Image (cartoon, rainbow, N blue to C red):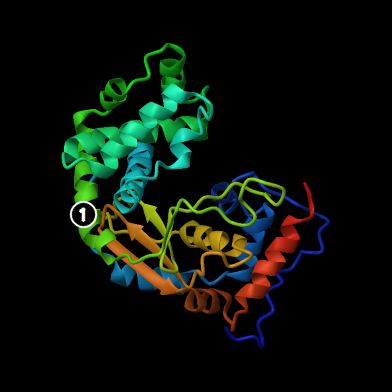
């Protein structure tokens, strides 16, 4: 990458502490956080990328069938990961009860069904059950009590979790899975890193924030989104690229201080539209910053910012 004319310092960074919500996905939406402010100050030009995205995206292929949108998104992420690596149970599904052997046995069996079963309906039900486990951990027992209640009541079994998905959820996930196999997975090449964490988000002494991406495939940092765009005046739902979608990808890449994943492209798979869009990292950073951009220097700057005392 070019080195000249590539200053990355936004205004206001003579601070002695950093501010974070604790998760990158929230920080990118909040301009008051250190990373939220940094991304907006450094990469203000979102509209050219949005225009390019709008020109490339296709029509809506899979509408909502009434299933819980958040669980659909998590379940599809799990399906794609387990198709790529069927023998690797995602840690996000196991971590709710890290020391409970029975819980792990059930979760591992559900993951095997998702990754190995040729019965798409069964795999969809298993993915829905796994997604409930992931979202219970993310939300906390107070907000998602179903799985903890089943575990504490001795009723957390494979059969019980397979029964949680209604017909709408199964139909929706089967359709999304089949489309992703054709429009996404067939186009990906390894090496694969599934659910990657980064230098500043890995558990340990350097962790400053929670951040886990969907996957890296051969240098492509990919975000999978199942968002259904709002209707326009014509009653259609054309897909849109929100600034937060781009900022989250840039945030992940900036947290990869050591360049562990050799990220050279950013991509979004819009699952309901069956569209995979990817851009060279250098193109995104230059276009959005309005100058030749030194990404390694930006990574170092973010590292320095995140070493400051917590606000």
Q: Is residue 209 left or right of residue 221?
A: right
- Residue 227 versus residue 43 in the image, above or below: above
- Residue 277 versus residue 102 in the image, above or below: below
Determine which residue is flagged by label 1: 179
Report x, y in % for residue 289: 58, 75
- Between 115 and 171, the one lying in front of the other is 115
- Residue 297 versus residue 204 in the image, above or below: below
- Between 304 and 126, the one lying in front of the other is 126
Note whether residue 68 is visible: no
Q: In the displayed image of the protein, which residue is found farthest to the left?
A: 119
Report x, y in % for residue 64: 25, 42
Quadrant housing residue 188: bottom left
Identify the residue shown where x is 76% and y is 56%.
307
Identify the residue shown where x is 44% and y is 36%.
93
Q: In the displayed image of the protein, which residue is found farthest to the top?
A: 153
- Between 102 and 11, the one lying in front of the other is 102
- Locate the N terminus and report the quarter of the image it occupies: bottom right
Identify the residue shown where x is 74% and y is 60%.
305
Quadrant housing residue 189: bottom left
Q: In the displayed image of the protein, which residue is found farthest to the bottom?
A: 4
- Mark count: 1
Quadrant housing residue 102: top left
Identify the residue shown where x is 29% and y is 50%.
83
- Between 33 and 235, the one lying in front of the other is 33
Report x, y in % for residue 213: 48, 53
Decide: few, some or many residues near mark 1? Use Cα within 10 Å; few <14, some 14-19, many ≥20.
Answer: some
Which type of secondary structure does the marked residue at label 1 adopt?
A: helix
- Residue 7 versus residue 188 in the image, above or below: below
Report x, y in % for residue 46: 49, 69
């Amino acid at each position: 990458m070019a080195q000249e004319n590539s200053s990355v310092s936004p205004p206001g960074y003579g601070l002695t502490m950093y501010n974070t919500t604790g998760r990158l996905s929230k920080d990118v939406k909040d301009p008051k956080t250190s990373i939220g402010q940094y991304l907006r100050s450094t990469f203000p030009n979102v509209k050219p990328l949005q225009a390019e995205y709008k020109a490339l995206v296709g029509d809506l292929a899979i509408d909502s069938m009434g299933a819980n949108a958040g669980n659909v998104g998590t379940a599809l992420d799990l399906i794609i990961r387990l198709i790529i690596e069927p023998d690797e149970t995602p840690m996000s599904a196991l971590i709710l009860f890290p020391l409970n052997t029975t819980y792990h046995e059930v979760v591992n069996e559900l993951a095997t069904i998702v990754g190995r079963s040729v019965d798409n309906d069964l795999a969809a039900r298993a993915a829905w059950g796994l997604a409930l486990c992931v979202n219970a951990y993310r939300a906390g027992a107070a907000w998602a009590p179903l799985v903890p209640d089943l575990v504490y009541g001795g009723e957390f079994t494979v059969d019980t979790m397979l029964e949680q998905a209604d017909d709408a959820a199964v139909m929706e996930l089967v359709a999304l899975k089949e489309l992703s196999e054709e429009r996404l997975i067939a186009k990906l090449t390894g090496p694969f890193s599934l659910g990657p964490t980064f230098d500043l988000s890995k558990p340990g002494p350097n962790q400053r924030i929670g951040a886990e991406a969907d996957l890296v495939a051969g240098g492509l940092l990919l975000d999978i989104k199942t968002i259904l765009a709002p209707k326009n005046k014509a009653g259609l739902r054309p897909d849109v690229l929100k600034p937060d979608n781009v900022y989250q990808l840039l945030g992940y890449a900036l947290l990869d201080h050591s360049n562990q994943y050799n990220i050279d492209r950013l991509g979004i798979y819009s699952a309901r539209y069956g569209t995979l869009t990817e851009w060279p990292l250098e193109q995104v950073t230059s276009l959005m910053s309005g100058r030749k951009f030194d990404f390694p220097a930006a990574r170092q700057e973010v590292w320095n910012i995140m070493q400051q005392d917590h606000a």
